[in-house]
Amino acid sequence: MIISTRALEAHIGATVALRGWLLSKQVRGKLAFLGLRDGEGVAQLVCEARSLPEDIFASLGSLGLETPLEVKGRVVLPPGKTRPELAVSSLRASPCDPDYPIGRKEHGPDFLMEKRHLWLRAPRQAAILRIRSSLEFACEDFLHQEGFYRFDSPLITPTACEGTSQLFELDYFGKKAYLSQSGQLYAEAGIAALERVYTMGPCFRAEKSVTRRHLTEFWGVEPEMAHVDAEANMAFQERFIRAVLSKVAVEREQDLVELGRDPGSLEFGPGAFPVLLYDEVLALLAKEGREKPWGEDLSVEDEEVLTRLFATPIFVYKYPVACRAFYIEVDSARPELALASDCLMPDGFGEIISGGQRARDLGFLEARIAAQGLGRESLEWYLDLRRWGSVIHSGFGMGIERMLRWICGLHHIREAIPFARNPQRYSP
Ligand code: ATP
Ligand code: MN
């Protein structure tokens, strides 16, 4: 019976088969230890000269890393060890070039990114990608249970919804089009049909510089809800984050541990995530020695200092209107404030979600579009949403790679997606 490396524990004493790739190799006289990896993890294979045909044992010394292997043997738990091993009684290797380019020695990030198609196989990278898959599924699962419909927005669009500076321009049969930087405007069209929708797909941003938190192609999950105001929107985000993290913690416990991450740190205590007004944040930052003029957006460093003061995610609410996109609703009591919130992860991490209540009034939106010098023509359809059936509504967007980076405690976002794109790289 072929089982996966993760199932070894349940088969101690049994004879089973494993199928995978050679990860590591140590031959010592009449004994060889092979590391075998498959899609679920890694297993240690113990090969004794007396248990294998002579030619097979002799061939072990020349096996190259990444050789595909099929092995059979008995699952044993050696005294004093916590992980079962396979005492191999038969082994079949498929052909493989020698000299796998990624060795045991330390490689620099540029080399590894150049060889990303192979680097993916490293146990740590594979663990991250399994966690990513669980994270994406957990987002969809929660939203589905909450009555949302998946609503796939277009990726080719005529709208430059937050200015053109971050857009990838496209020649669309002689006309200008852009790669979508967010599905939100389309999701707003979706709610008048389906009330609760989410988009989940690639977002493209021509970020100008390489940072540890930005990609030029990332995946966004963007829920949008009719009849929900800015405050209910934050409460919903809190439930979303808690549910998603706790599902990932359970499903990927072993992978998290292998990354050195305590699965328990994905759960937060019972108190609600604090909601801090922008004005309060300025005061807090000033106390930390960071005076800021009113009206400026928080910088990466501001978010770092601020989130070090908290052990749970926090919301920063009511940003100055000037810091936010044209479609955000304003506070009727203080029109210089936007009903927008960011959710920041603790311990210096910073922004993971931006959200807010959307402007409902046609005249207000027209004025905002004009004031920001945005092309009104391509937004005419969006204005229609205010002409017919406009209701209070809110939504938010979370970057999958941002969240994964936090979950896994990754230094750099490039490890949070199979093939990262940044201003300097679009291959392999
Ligand atoms: P930042 O201020 O960090 O550059 P933003 O405020 O420009 O991000 P939003 O438009 O609010 O980004 O996008 C919603 C979410 O999408 C962000 O909170 C973040 O999780 C994610 N995100 C935005 N830009 C990127 C990017 N370039 N790479 C990866 N994730 C991103
Ligand atoms: Mn944002």
Image (cartoon, helix red, strand yellow):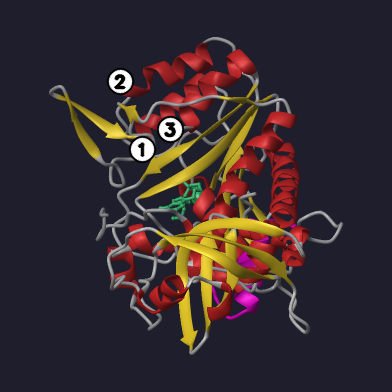
Residue 388 painted magenta = no
The answer to whether the residue labelled 2 contacts the one labelled 1, judged by CB atoms less than 8 Å apart, is: no
What numbered label is drawn on residue 377? Answer: 2
- Residue shown at 26%/58% (left/top)? 425
Corner quadrant of residue 128: bottom right
Q: Position of residue 314 (x, y in %)?
A: 69, 58
Task: State the residue position of label 3.
Answer: 368
Between residue 187 and residue 342, name the one nearer to us. 187
In the picture, measured across the screen, residue 393 lies left or right of residue 269, that is left
Task: State the residue position of label 1.
Answer: 372
Under mark 1, the amino acid is: Gln
Between residue 29 and residue 379, name the one nearer to us. 29
Local crowd at mark 2 within 10 Å, few (<14), some, or many (≥20)?
few
Residue range corresponding to the magenta coloring:
274-294
Residue 292 painted magenta = yes
Q: CA distance from mark 2 to mark 1?
A: 14 Å
- Residue shown at 67%/69% (left/top)? 257
Quadrant containing the C terminus in the rendered view: bottom left
Q: CA distance from mark 2 to mark 3?
A: 14 Å
The answer to whether the residue labelled 3 contacts the one labelled 1, judged by CB atoms less than 8 Å apart, is: yes
Label 1: which secondary element: loop
Label 2: which secondary element: helix
Q: Is residue 258 above or below residue 184?
A: below
Kindly report which numbered mark, 2 or 1, lies closer to the viewer in this rendering. Answer: 2
Q: Is residue 393 above or below residue 295?
A: above
In the picture, measured across the screen, residue 189 lies left or right of residue 202, that is right
